[in-house]
Amino acid sequence: MTDPLLQLARSFAEAAPPQPDLVETPINPAPVICFDQLLDALVEKRWFVAEHYLPEALCTDLLADLQQLHQAAQLSPAGVGRGQEHLLNENIRGDYTHWLDGSTPAQQAYLAIMRELKDTLNRELFLGLFEYECHYAFYPPGAFYQKHLDSFRGRSNRKVTTVLYLNPDWQPADAGEMRVYHPDTGLPLLDVPPRSGTLVCFLSEEIPHEALPTTANRASIAGWFRCNASLNGRIDPAL
Ligand SMILES: O=C(O)CCC(=O)C(=O)O
Ligand SMILES: [Fe+2]
């Protein structure tokens, strides 16, 4: 089912005059990734999944970064809700997280790709995305994240979700797939194996999803492109 607003935005973008190429050398050149299929899928279906979407070497470095944080006891049990409503609830989710801050080369490379994706989404679909926040997530055996939406219309400024998986040796018996639900019927659409390099991307307010219980250690980066919700001089809270 095509999203009419995104389709309208795209038709405006296509009508815009071409911009001159910028001749600028980025300080940290990120791997060049073609986002065309991702954009088409978001407009057509509101979700996108692709295997081997990010370079294997980068996923290896990101997993090593996460493992180092785990060993240094830098992961915290994930909570549910925002601000004062933030609660720990293992019946809803059992993962451990650490927010990326660009403090390692692997994080910088990943954040540069996501910056590029944000700029592309804004240029092509006029989404008005303001920033990207993301965390490593580690699910030990037995952990899951129940069916949910990442954002409720008008109550959150998360607009587009990304999940990158970092499990190079994933086997079907390891389970822990992401189950994606149809935005209109609410019926299960597909189960995504959390294999290293697979990227899932969807509209945060529209696509219900869950992480099925895993039987093996499961690593990922979950992230959200947000619009700016600063109001009356009150700065938009990060969490
Ligand atoms: O890891 C996954 O498959 C899903 C994670 C998720 O839904 C979330 O962190 O909001
Ligand atoms: Fe989610």
Image (spheres, rainbow, N blue to C red):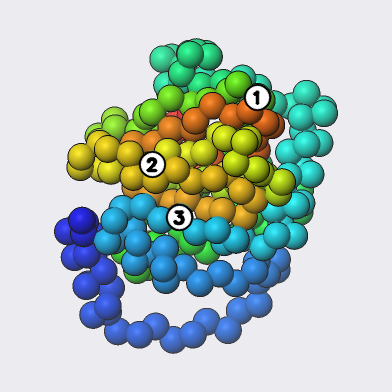
User: Which residue type carries mark 2?
Assistant: Val
Image coordinates of residue 181 in percent, x first then y, are 33, 40
At x 44%, y 51%, the residue is: 201
Q: Which residue is under mark 2? A: 180
User: Contact (CB < 8 A) between labels 3 and 1?
Assistant: no
3D distance between C-alphas at marks 1 and 2: 21 Å
Circle 1: residue type: Pro
Residue 140 in the image: x percent, y percent? 66, 25
In the depicted structure, whether residue 190 falls above or below residue 110:
above
Query: Is mark 3 in CB contact (under 8 Å) with mark 2?
Result: yes
Mark sitting earlier along the chain (3/1): 3
Instruction: Report x, y in % for residue 18.
Output: 35, 85
Asked if the residue at label 3 sits under 8 Å from ligand 1, the reply is no
Say what secondary structure mark 1 lies in. loop
User: Which quadrant would residue 148 be assigned to in this image?
Assistant: top left
Residue drawn at 31 percent across, 53 percent down = 46
- Report the front residue among 174 and 79: 174
Answer yes or no: is residue 154 visible: yes
Disc on res. 141: 1
The numbered mark at residue 49 is: 3
Distance of label 3 from label 1 (alpha carbons): 24 Å
